[in-house]
Amino acid sequence: MKQRNKLMIPGPVPVWEETLDALGEQVMSNYTEEFIPIYRKTMDFLHQVFQTQHDISCSPHPAQARSRLASPACLTVAKRLRR
């Protein structure tokens, strides 16, 4: 019996060969020209999913990095509100 690789998130779970191949490819940077149409299509899709025309915030960064980026802005607003 062939032993299958397992993905440990939060797994273990079996992994298809196609998934392993995709994980082995070079990751597309979020600052390249080829990323822009993908981002726009994703944002259009999110507007449909959430049924809104309002702004949606979508970041290609991990949540931890995003919260670190937002923290200084939140602190600045909090300082203004205390005045």
Image (spheres, rainbow, N blue to C red):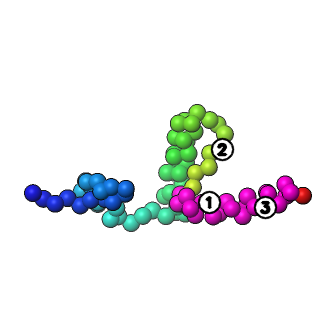
Which residue carries the number 2 mark?
A: 55
- The magenta segment: 60-82
Identify the residue position indicated by label 3 in the image: 76
Q: Specify the quadrant of the image occupied by residue 10.
A: bottom left
The residue depicted at 64 percent of the width and 37 percent of the height is: 53
The CA distance from mark 2 to mark 1 is 18 Å
Q: Main secondary structure of the magenta part?
A: helix
The reply to whether the magenta stretch includes residue 7 is no
Q: Nearer the viewer, residue 43 or 10?
A: 10
Residue shown at the point (53%, 36%) measured from the top left: 49
- Left or right of 1: which side holds 47? right
Tag 1: residue type?
A: Ser
Determine the CA span between mark 1 and mark 3: 14 Å
Going by the image, does 78 lie left or right of 41? Answer: right
Left of 70 or right of it: where is 83? right
Q: Is residue 41 above or below residue 70?
A: above
Q: Earlier in the sequence, mark 1 or mark 3?
A: 1
